[in-house]
Image (cartoon, rainbow, N blue to C red):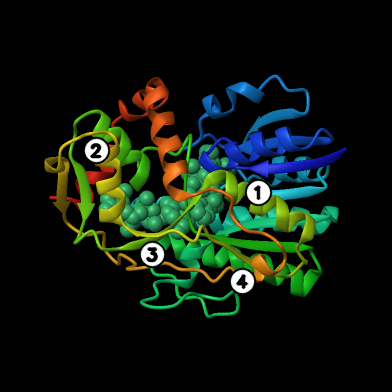
Amino acid sequence: MRKYLVTGGAGFIGSNYIRYMLNKYKDVSIINLDKLTYAGNLENLKDVENDPRYEFVKGDIGDEAIVDELIAKADVVVNFAAESHVDRSIGAPDDFIKTDIFGAFVLLEAARKHHVDRFIQISTDEVYGSIENGSFKETDPLMPSSPYSASKTGADRLAFSYFVTYGVPVIITRCSNNYGPFHYPEKLIPLFITNALEDKPLPIYGDGLYVRDWIYVEDHCAGVDFVTEKGEPGEVYNIGGGNERTNLEITDYVLRKLEKPETLKTFVKDRPGHDRRYAVDCSKMNAMGWKPKHDLTQALDKTISWYIDNRSWWEKIKSGEYLDYYKQQYQS
Ligand code: NAD
Ligand code: DAU
């Protein structure tokens, strides 16, 4: 029985990953350590909560005592825990530094002490910064431009240093923009689907011509599992969906699919320091035999249907005041 410690497993990608792993393998056990910040939601894991192979522990990855106790029992650590929203990092960077950098440090220290078999640091394509043409390779310099991406870069390089300096078997993944079920409705795709369903305006930052590469969350989960099995310690792996779209293209698609009027499109003040385009070169993973399985249109349709069918999940979240609070700071 292989024992996993998954951090941030009550969030969007972490919860999809836990479900993916429990479905794929019989012989795994998973402890999910999550602080349950505004983004952590145990409803994301309702279907697996009684699985005897799964255990939830509420706690902070910056808490040395709890991290030490849990990593002592783990073979593999997968660190998803992070403050993940760029807009929030612009308004209040503190928690980004605490969780994304210091939290990763606490995990790495415990991994060093307890000699884990693998430490997977979930980094992001945002660490490279923006690129006008072409795409970034794993060896390209890092040029993050938001407090979020800078904190993720700190953790990414700290993890690498624990491989070089102490021999901790660290693997780093840098994935592009995920979409799919349980995506918190503050991010572009779930915000726009749910706003459209509520006939509310879709706030497009700037000219809407910013480009992201979209990957279905299950493909990201499969990629993380793939590098855990086939990746080499000390290596970085880009994981991309191969689906570059402008934000306007995504917006138009959502509105067409939901048969909602173009008039919901609302151009608002731009995000400060907004990266124009992200693009990663995935030839390293492709050469190892991995590629994403999902087609953007089909998986986006599936995602839109999920939000239609799970209205109570997102209505509960959106009835809180946090969205208005953060949005007021950047939009006039
Ligand atoms: P999310 O915000 O939905 O979830 C983050 C989870 O971490 C939440 O459950 C939250 O409660 C938990 N958490 C936060 N601080 C914590 C702490 N101090 N201790 C323990 N738990 C804590 O984020 P997500 O979109 O699922 O992203 C997960 C990871 O993947 C992040 O590391 C993010 O940087 C990375 N990533 C995300 C994307 C994307 O498109 N969403 C792409 C590439 C990489
Ligand atoms: O690239 C990977 C990253 O993708 C992850 O590391 C981050 O955790 C994740 O949040 C995501 O970051 P982005 O900033 O790209 O995602 P977001 O959904 O916030 O924005 C996507 C694009 O849409 C971006 O160009 C900003 C724009 N946008 C976003 C929101 C929320 C809008 O135009 N309007 C909006 O209301």
The secondary element bearing badge 4 is classed as helix
Query: Residue 222, labelled with which disc?
Result: 1
Kindly identify which residue carries mark 4: 283
Is label 4's Cβ within 8 Å of ligand 2? no
Q: In which quarter of the image is residue 275?
A: bottom left
Q: How crowded is mark 1: few (under 14 residues within 10 Å), some or many (20 or more)?
A: some
Sooner in the amino-acid sequence: mark 4 or mark 1 = 1
Sooner in the amino-acid sequence: mark 2 or mark 1 = 1
Nearer the observer, disc 3 or disc 1? Answer: 1
Cβ atoms under marks 2 and 3 closer than 8 Å: no
Measure the alpha-carbon separation of dots 3 and 1: 28 Å
Cβ atoms under marks 2 and 4 closer than 8 Å: no
Sooner in the amino-acid sequence: mark 3 or mark 4 = 3
Measure the alpha-carbon separation of dots 2 and 3: 21 Å
Query: Residue 324, labelled with which disc?
Result: 2
**In the image, what residue occupies the spot 53% across and 24% down?**
43
Nearer the observer, disc 2 or disc 4? Answer: 4
* Left or right of residue 211, residue 205 in this image: left
Kind of residue at badge 1: Ala
Sooner in the amino-acid sequence: mark 3 or mark 1 = 3
Kind of residue at badge 2: Asp
Kindly identify which residue carries mark 3: 146
Kind of residue at badge 3: Ser
